Each structure stands twice: as structure tokens, then as C-alpha cells.
Image (spheres, rainbow, N blue to C red):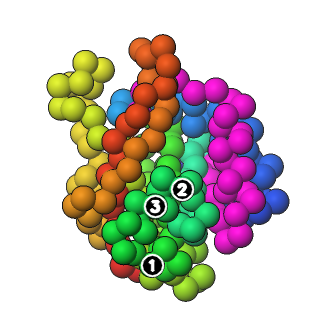
Amino acid sequence: MTLRIESFSGADARRHIPALAKLRIEIFRDFPYLYDGGEEYERKYLRTYTESPDSVIVVAFDGERIVGASTALPLKHETPNIVEAFRARGYDIDKIFYFGESVLAKTYRGQGAGVKFFEHREAWATKLGYEHAAFCAVVRPADHPRRPKDYVPLDAFWRHRGYRLVPGLECTFEWKDLDEPVQSPKRMIFWMKTL
């Protein structure tokens, strides 16, 4: 299978929002996110990446079908809980480009799309003059009841791409897990790289 990877910004990205919203709901149901999301929320969330100046959505296509995507934007345009986590630790938020989530349909994994997602976002951030890239990951306990026996975290992949876990830099997000009646806070930890 050959995937086509393209970057979109602004109005060009906007036309992909419906397909991306559905894909995010599908992929984030899996561990470690276990996200019980809705399409309306997803479309609203993704609008951040079409309305924020200098943001980018990297999309993976199989033919004309969207099978994966990755988002990024200037950190200063992210949600307050993320921005404040960096500000509280003394970071200059104007120098950091924030990488949102990457999602890819299972049958397309292991073909290099993850690497391309990082390459495209890093190139975009570098072109705009940003000095650092950062992203976060959810923390789940090792004995979580929904953790698959064959689950392998992406830490080694991220390290290979040059990212390092930043001790003590964290925040929380709230969402509804598949087995929860309401939203609950999830601990998120940050990884960074100098571009």
C-alpha cells in the first residue's frame, strides 16, 4: 500500500474536518485513550486547527480516502491548561510549536506514516521559525483493566525521533472513557525536541 501524505492549513484543511472527526472517534476508542467521543465535539475541536494562524493538519490518504491525520499549531493558540503548564515552568511559549494528536487506521500502521507526520509538522514549525516542538501523551497505569496484553507504548519511537520526556511538565485533560458515566481528569505528560 502506498500512502499519500499532504499538509493543509486554513480553508484547505477545513474541508477535511468531517472525515477527520470520524477517524479520531474511531482511533481514540482504543487504549490508551479509551475515548467515548462525539462528532459534534470533534468538529469543534478540529476547528482550532483551521482557525489558528500558522496551524497545519497533515493528512494520510489511500487514494482519496483519509486514513490518518496529525495536527499542529503554535503553542500560544492551544487550550489554557496546556499553555499554562509551559508558562508555569518558565518556557517562552512563543518559541514552541505544539503537536496535537496523530491518528492512523490500524491496517496502515508500520508503513512510515508516523515518521512522515513528524517530518511534515517539524518542517512546518521550522519554516515558521519555531525553536522547539512539544506534544503530550496520556498516562495510564500498567495494570489498567483495558490495557491489551500486546500493548507497546510509543516512547521508543518518540525518542528515536529526538523527543525527550520533560520531568514535571504535565497537565490534565478531561474526557469520558468508554466505561465511564461522565468525564474524568486524565494525567498528561509532555515530550519536547529542539528543532
Which residues are drawn in magenta? 33-61
Q: Residues within 10 Å of mark 1 (few under 14, many from 20)?
A: few
- Residue 16 % position (x, y): 74, 47
Residue 94 included in the magenta stretch of the image: no
Circle 2 packing at 10 Å, graded few (<14), some (14-19), many (20+), is: few
The three-letter code of the residue at mark 3 reads Glu
Tell whether 127 sits left or right of 189: right
Sequence-wise first label, 3 or 1: 3
Q: Quadrant of residue 169?
A: bottom left
Q: Earlier in the sequence, mark 2 or mark 1?
A: 2
Q: Are marks 2 and 1 in contact (CB under 8 Å)?
A: no
Residue at 39% across, 75% down: 91
For disc 1, the marked residue is 92
Q: Splitting the image into 4 quarters, where does residue 68 fall?
A: top right
Q: Quadrant of the C terminus?
A: bottom left
Q: Residue 20 at what x, y percent from top left?
A: 66, 41
